[in-house]
Image (spheres, helix red, strand yellow):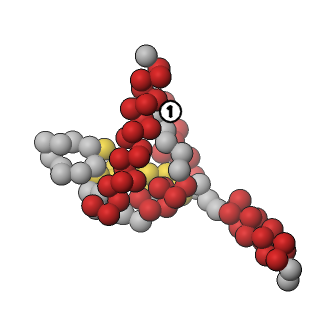
Amino acid sequence: MSKSDKSNTQTEKKAEAPLKAVALKYEPEKNNAPCVVASGTGSIAQKILQVALENGIAIYHDDSAATLLSKLDQGQEIPPELYQVVVNIYLYLLDLAEQRK
């Protein structure tokens, strides 16, 4: 297999990767960090995104973040090693909210 064949195969595998979605919620009076409230792949991920859209919840698209966060259990607080990932999400959402004003 040539280098370009390997590259094409890797690209095809990435294109076939199922959709992943993770929903977070932060309640400072209850939790020390945001918690995973929903997580899934494929049709479950599509349903999570649909519910978010129907409720006016902004969506952040990042496959790497979704992959990392989807490894957590529902109800689990974000561990300190993933704080930067969540900070990046919140900064994006704050910027998006500011643009919509």
Measuring from the top left, give residue 26's x and y in whole percent.
Answer: 26, 43
Left or right side of 56 for 72: left
Residue occupying image coordinates x 32% and y 63% = 81
The local crowd at label 1, few if under 14, some if 14 to 19, many if 20 or more residues have their Cα within 10 Å, is few
The residue singled out by tag 1 in the image is: 53
Please tell me how many numbered marks the rendered image carries.
Answer: 1
Quadrant where the image shows the C terminus: top left
Left or right side of 4 for 67: left
Please state which of residues 101 and 72 is positioned toward the viewer in this rendering. 101
Question: Relative to residue 30, is residue 7 depicted above or below?
Answer: below
Measuring from the top left, give residue 99's x and y in whole percent.
Answer: 47, 22
Residue occupying image coordinates x 81% and y 68% = 8
Residue lying at the far left of the rendered structure: 29
Secondary structure found at label 1 = helix
Residue occupying image coordinates x 42% and y 44% = 89
- Let me know if residue 76 appears in the view: no
Residue lying at the far top of the rendered structure: 101
Left or right side of 43 for 23: left
* Amino acid type of the residue tagged 1 in the rendering: Leu
Residue occupying image coordinates x 86% and y 80% = 2
Quadrant where the image shows the N terminus: bottom right
Measuring from the top left, give residue 86's x and y in whole percent.
Answer: 37, 50
- Let me know if residue 36 appears in the view: yes
Measuring from the top left, give residue 15's x and y in whole percent.
Answer: 71, 59
